[in-house]
Image (tube, rainbow, N blue to C red):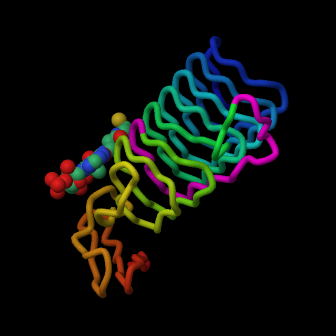
């Protein structure tokens, strides 16, 4: 099995793309990009040189994954969401040596039109609502909305809100996956069921 590239897309020589991946219309993948298996790059997606994208990620239309962004496996990037890599850009000041790293961990959803200000880590399976602006690290399973984004709850791996408070003690079993989530102080963890 190999990957497929629409004739209108440009994949620079040297780019690594895993089996089963699909590169759709007008996308551009730079030479240094490392992209896993079964990844979908939607229409007009850009992938920079210093970028890694894990297996089974879905990048919707009009997303630019700039240098110094790393996506672990199973990340969903909603349409027209925005990554950044320079914290304080000025057209007249060269800042290519000042890129800040952004790490998006396994299973995260980045909602449509959200913005991730560079230099943050977004924890496993966190869910970023449409239009949110992320400018701080995000906890695993946190549901974040607004500008700047605030945590309003917890989201299961299945994609439903978990009826537990933001802090305290508690337990919840997902009715779809049977996975069991434990709240301990202000952190949520999934224990294998
Ligand atoms: C977060 C989301 C999944 C809703 O989850 P939910 O569990 O149904 O949450 P609710 O709609 O009950 O919202 C809870 C509260 O957060 C607010 N809220 C929900 N999403 C919000 C968002 N994106 N931005 C700001 N506030 C939001 C609601 O207005 C509500 O506030 P209230 O309690 O004051 O009325 C949904 O709003 C969202 O953003 N989905 C992303 C869609 C997307 O980007 N898809 C891309 C692929 S097409």
Q: Is residue 72 magenta?
A: no
- Camera-side residue of 122 and 9: 122
Q: In this view, does 90 lie to the left or right of 117?
A: right
Q: Is residue 141 left or right of residue 49?
A: left
Q: In this view, does 113 lie to the left or right of 71?
A: left
- Screen quadrant of the C terminus: bottom left
Dominant secondary-structure state across the stretch colored magenta: loop
- Residue 172: percent from left, percent from top: 27, 77
Question: Where 22 sits versus 103, above or below?
Answer: above
- Residue 140: percent from left, percent from top: 46, 67
Tell me where residue 168 sits by quadrant. Answer: bottom left
Q: Is residue 103 magenta?
A: yes
Q: Residue furthest front?
A: 92
- Screen quadrant of the N terminus: top right
- Camera-side residue of 157 and 193: 157
Question: Where 104 sits versus 17, above or below?
Answer: below
Residue at 77% across / 37% down in the picture? Answer: 49
Magenta stretch?
91-113
Residue at 43% across / 42% down in the picture? Answer: 114
Residue at 48% across / 32% down in the picture? Answer: 60
- Residue 115: percent from left, percent from top: 48, 42
- Residue 75: percent from left, percent from top: 51, 49
């Amino acid at each position: 099995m190999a990957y497929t590239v629409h004739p209108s897309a440009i994949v620079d020589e040297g780019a690594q793309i895993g089996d089963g991946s699909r590169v759709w219309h007008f996308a551009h993948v730079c030479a240094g990009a490392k992209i896993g298996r079964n990844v979908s790059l939607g229409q007009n997606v850009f992938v920079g040189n210093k970028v890694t994208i894990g297996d089974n990620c879905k990048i919707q239309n009009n997303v630019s994954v700039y240098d110094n962004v790393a996506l672990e496996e199973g990340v969903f990037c909603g349409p027209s969401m925005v990554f950044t890599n320079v914290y304080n850009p000025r057209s007249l000041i060269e800042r290519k040596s000042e890129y800040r790293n952004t790490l998006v961990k396994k299973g995260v959803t980045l909602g449509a039109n959200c913005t991730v200000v560079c230099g943050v880590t977004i924890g496993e399976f966190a869910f970023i609502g449409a239009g949110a602006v992320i400018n701080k690290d995000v906890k695993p399973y946190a549901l974040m909305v607004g500008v700047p984004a605030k945590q309003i709850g917890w989201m299961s791996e299945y994609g439903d809100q978990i009826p537990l408070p933001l802090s305290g003690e508690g337990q919840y079993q997902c009715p779809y996956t049977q996975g069991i989530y434990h709240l301990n102080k202000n952190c949520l963890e999934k224990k294998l069921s």
